[in-house]
Image (spheres, helix red, strand yellow):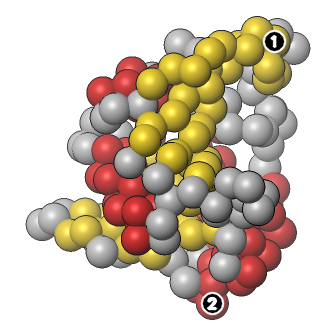
Amino acid sequence: MTTSPQTTIAILPANHIARRARELGAVLHACVHAGASVNFILPFSEDDAGGFWIHKVLPGVCAGTRTLLVAEIAGRIAGTVLLDTDTPPNQPHRAEVSKLLVHPDFRRRGIARALMAELERLACDQGRRLITLDTRTGDTAEPLYASIGYLTAGIIPGYCRDPFDDTLDPTTIMYKAL
């Protein structure tokens, strides 16, 4: 667990995910509506956002193959990140990052950086020595990842649909050896 005077970062246990699905959904919903390319396109409702955490994240957390970290400020979920360790038998040393989200109300406070530091610590504790991720090329997350040591493996053109229109955006595949 990482704590600062204003921000607490901790694992959200499986038995809390359904209870806090509306709060988690509010973060996801706000980020998508702010332009985040995190697998969803508009229209995207708050119910869809809350359902994602219950139907897509909770099963992996219950199975022990995903860890959900949340950043809280004054009891409010300000950000999230997922550590996915559901890797094939020939990749027990690797994990994947997904859903690094910081609610627009809480950006520019170091929350994303703190979430990633805790994720990397957890990955090391689980024997993971290589972290991979993808991010829409040119998004604000790309320089953040580079600043904390992630290297670009390559760019795939036309990888994902823009959340607002029918254009296809490239994605940057990144990695970091821990």
The label on residue 115 is none
- The image position of residue 83, as x and y in percent, is 56, 59
- The image position of residue 119, as x and y in percent, is 42, 58
Whether residue 49 sits left or right of residue 15 in the image: it is right
The structure residue drawn at horizontal position 80% and vertical position 33%, both measured from the top left corner, is 41
Q: Amino acid at mark 1?
A: Gly
Vertical placement of residue 164 versus 90, above or below = above
Residue that badge 2 annotates: 15
- The image position of residue 36, as x and y in percent, is 61, 32
Location of residue 16 by image quarter: bottom right
Question: Residue farthest to the left?
Answer: 5
Question: Which label sits in the foreground, 1 or 2?
Answer: 1
Depth check: give the residue in front, 133 or 129.
129
The structure residue drawn at horizontal position 21% and vertical position 70%, both measured from the top left corner, is 3
Q: Amino acid at mark 2?
A: Asn
Question: Residue farthest to the right?
Answer: 166
- The image position of residue 152, as x and y in percent, is 51, 20
Question: Residue farthest to the bottom?
Answer: 15
Q: Is residue 44 visible?
A: yes
The structure residue drawn at horizontal position 51% and vertical position 47%, both measured from the top left corner, is 130
- Structural crowding at the residue carrying mark 1, measured as other residues with C-alpha within 10 Å and reported as few (<14), some (14–19) or many (≥20): few
Whether residue 47 sits left or right of residue 30 in the image: it is right
Q: Secondary structure at mark 2?
A: helix
- Structural crowding at the residue carrying mark 2, measured as other residues with C-alpha within 10 Å and reported as few (<14), some (14–19) or many (≥20): few
Question: Residue farthest to the front?
Answer: 90
- Whole-number angstrom distance, CA of label 1 to CA of label 2: 38 Å
Residue that badge 1 annotates: 158
Location of residue 167 by image quarter: top right
Vertical placement of residue 12 versus 25, above or below = below
Q: Secondary structure at mark 1?
A: strand
Vertical placement of residue 10 versus 6, above or below = below
